[in-house]
Amino acid sequence: MNDLSRFANHYWFKYKRAGACSELRGRVCIQVVFVSSPNAPWSERSQNDFWKIAFDAREILLSQARHYGVPLEIDFRGLVMNVPAGQEHNFVPYLPSFFHRPTLAQAQDYYKDYYSCDEAPIIFVVNADGRSYAQNDKRGDMWDYDEMSVLRRPFCPGLFMHELLHQYGAQDYYFPAWLTNLAAQYAPTSVMLSGSYHDIDEVSAYLIGWTSRLSARSQWFLEQTLCITEESHRRALEEEWKKKVY
């Protein structure tokens, strides 16, 4: 049984192919932007330490892609964006002048053409403690859903994967709060449940375009989560963000 029509109105399906990127396949060139300020500088050594994590994340992603039979190449390009002291967490106003483009979507299109790749997701990295996230609301003309990912310490490969996959439509499995226990039953080692894990579960694989079929277990998980709405997700997200610490 693989008729997924009954999930057409599932909240998560709203974002399948609706993020900054469409499907995680083909040649992907990830633009890593090191957001550097006098308070949170990026030295050559600290950049090298981060690249080790990014390369580990790439190897895991490639291995997972092979498991699903998906052709995937991942390249990286590094950029440094210098911002004034104290602005490392508030760098959004500096993006148009940094990219010489009014929107990140236009910046991505430029990099896709320049590097002749299928996708060019942008990841911002801040050398300071705090909550990592993928941009998922609208703020004027700058933003589209999940147009960028922001990573903050502590860095690890699973965190890199988790926030990148958001740009392709994958969803968090840890809020609303009841979802955590349910997801732990369904996919206890999914990277969308925790950045400590590295597995890309079948529902996440479907959302990022890696599979068109879902097992009975995955469909059970979708059945249990049909009650999630945009409003309940928004409230849960607001509660989650109250916990953020910089």
Image: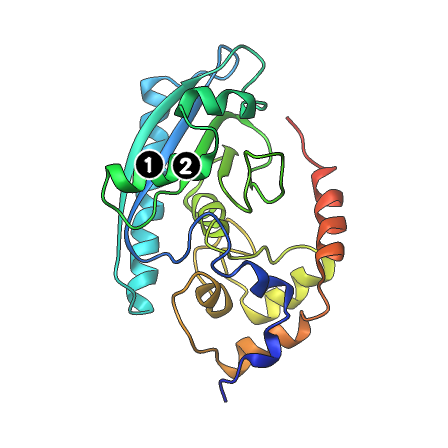
Q: Is residue 18 left or right of residue 112?
A: right
The structure's colour scheme is: rainbow
Is 185 located above or below residue 179 in the figure? below
Distance from Cα at disc 2 to Cα at disc 1: 6 Å
Q: Is residue 243 left or right of residue 139?
A: right
Is 224 located above or below residue 174 in the figure? below
* Within-10-Å neighbours for mark 2: few <14, some 14–19, many 20+: some
Task: Return the x and y of residue 205 as percentages of the image width and height.
Answer: 44, 65
Q: Amino acid at mark 2?
A: Gln
Q: How many marks?
A: 2
Q: In the rendering, which numbered label is found on residue 19? A: none
Q: What residue sits 32% from the left and 68% below the top? A: 67
The answer to whether any part of residue 221 appears in the image is no
Q: What residue sits 29% from the left and 69% below the top? A: 69
When asked about the image quadrant of residue 91, the answer is: top right
Which residue is labeled 1 in the image?
110
- The reply to whether discs 2 and 1 touch (Cβ–Cβ < 8 Å) is yes
Residue with the most extreme bottom position: 1
Task: Return the x and y of residue 218 as percentages of the image width and height.
Answer: 54, 75
Residue with the most extreme left position: 116
Q: Amino acid at mark 1?
A: Tyr
Q: What residue sits 32% from the left and 58% below the top? A: 25
Is 175 located above or below residue 95 in the figure? below
User: Callout 2: helix, strand or loop?
Assistant: helix
* Within-10-Å neighbours for mark 1: few <14, some 14–19, many 20+: some
Which residue is labeled 2 in the image?
106
When asked about the image quadrant of residue 239, the answer is: top right
